[in-house]
Image (cartoon, rainbow, N blue to C red):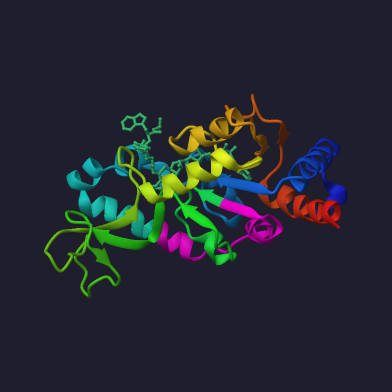
């Protein structure tokens, strides 16, 4: 979709957001599954696609889910990994990567485990929920750089424990360095740009409100309303791949 096809509301929202963001020195961007929807990766709330039809993420994305049915959970992640491996970053991912150099302080905090922000070139990045392409030992957190040969599902760590994906499951505490880095940036930022999240999973869901309470401006990009919409200063009702490239172009105009 080109600029001139943007609806008037969206175009106005982008311009307003650019005015607010261009004046900032410290920007935090937070993203959820909606950020990867235009790369062909189903969100957790999309109408059930083949991938989610029989699986309840709340059930399987837990330690108990893995302990009770390790082969099923292993296969669920293998299927998702295969689907994600075929996906590529879309212009919205590249727009966020371009933003990094435009601010004195920038941090991207993503809930996504699909590696697409990294592939698009983002470096100042916290992967709050881990990365589906990384693995670790289930019982002792040994790092697992390469999966062992063989077709055992799940494969075994050298210590004999099962191997699991290095992602954060429901009920698990996200990486504390990641949380502290995110909270430090959220407390200091002047603007938080929230893209493609339903704002339901904590602690990420609380970050925009924490930033707002600390005096930051909140800009949301999401075709649907969310709990964040109620307190956002600007809500751009558009998809990430449609809104973010013109937003970066407008930022460049404002900074010229
Ligand atoms: C924690 C990795 C403590 C795995 C994920 C009871 C028991 C135990 C815990 C809890 C409990 N009650 C509450 C909790 C806390 C729990 C929680 O929040 N539960 C919710 C359900 C209430 N949280 C936790 O357990 C977390 N740990 O709390 O530890 C703690 C915390 C801090 C400090 C100390 C201690 C751990 C949560 C991590 C779970 N792991 N993923 C895997 O993927 O398999 S969560 C997973 O689901 C995602 O990572 C993401 O976080 C979440 C899905 O949310 P979204 O990304 O927002 O995606 P969704 O589909 O919901 O929405 C998409 C949005 O995009 C929509 O709004 C849509 O409109 C929009 N959209 C669609 N297309 C586009 C678009 N937007 C823009 N452009 C588009 N094209």
- The image position of residue 225, as x and y in percent, is 63, 30
- The residue at the far bottom in this view is 149
Please tell me which residue is depicted at 35% across the width and 55% down the height of the picture. 77
| Part of the protein shown in magenta | 80-107
Nearer to us in this view, 118 or 77: 118
Q: In which quarter of the image is ligand 1?
A: top left
- The image position of residue 176, as x and y in percent, is 36, 47
**Residue 84 among those drawn in magenta:** yes
- The image position of residue 165, as x and y in percent, is 31, 57
Which quadrant: the C terminus? bottom right
**Residue 236 among those drawn in magenta:** no
- The image position of residue 31, as x and y in percent, is 56, 46
Please tell me which residue is depicted at 79% across the width and 38% down the height of the picture. 13
Please tell me whether residue 135 is drawn above or below residue 1 in the rendered image.
below
Please tell me which residue is depicted at 36% across the width and 63% down the height of the picture. 134
- The residue at the far top in this view is 230
Q: Give the left or right position of residue 218, taking residue 23 as reference.
A: left
Please tell me whether residue 118 is drawn above or below residue 239 in the rendered image.
below
Q: In which quarter of the image is residue 232?
A: top right
- The chief SS type of the magenta part is helix
Nearer to us in this view, 199 or 219: 219
Please tell me whether residue 164 is drawn above or below residue 151 in the rendered image.
above
Nearer to us in this view, 176 or 228: 176
- The residue at the far left in this view is 160
Q: Give the left or right position of residue 75, taking residue 111 as reference.
A: left
Please tell me which residue is depicted at 14% across the width and 59% down the height of the picture. 161
Please tell me whether residue 196 is drawn above or below residue 199 in the rendered image.
below
């Amino acid at each position: 979709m080109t600029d001139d096809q943007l609806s008037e509301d969206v175009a106005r929202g982008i311009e307003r957001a650019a005015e607010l963001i261009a004046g900032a020195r410290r920007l935090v961007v937070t993203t959820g599954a909606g950020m990867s929807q235009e790369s062909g990766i189903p969100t957790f709330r999309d109408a059930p696609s083949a991938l989610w039809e029989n699986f309840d993420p709340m059930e399987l994305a837990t330690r108990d889910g893995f302990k009770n049915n390790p082969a099923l959970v292993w296969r669920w992640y293998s299927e998702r990994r295969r689907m994600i491996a075929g996906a590529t970053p879309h212009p919205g991912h590249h727009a966020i990567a371009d933003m990094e150099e435009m601010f004195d302080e920038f941090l991207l905090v993503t809930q996504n485990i699909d590696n697409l922000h990294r592939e698009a070139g983002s470096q100042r990045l916290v992967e709050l929920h881990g990365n589906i392409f990384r693995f670790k030992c289930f019982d002792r957190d040994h790092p697992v750089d390469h999966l062992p040969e063989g077709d055992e599902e799940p494969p075994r760590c050298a210590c004999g424990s099962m191997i699991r994906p290095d992602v954060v499951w429901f009920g698990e505490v996200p990486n504390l360095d990641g949380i502290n880095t995110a909270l430090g940036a959220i407390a200091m930022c002047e603007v938080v740009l929230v893209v493609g999240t339903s704002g339901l999973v904590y602690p990420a869901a609380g970050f925009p409100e924490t930033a707002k309470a600390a005096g930051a401006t909140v800009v949301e990009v999401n075709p649907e309303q969310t709990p964040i919409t109620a307190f956002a200063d600007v809500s751009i009702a558009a998809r990430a791949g449609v809104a973010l490239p013109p937003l970066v172009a407008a930022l460049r105009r404002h900074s010229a």
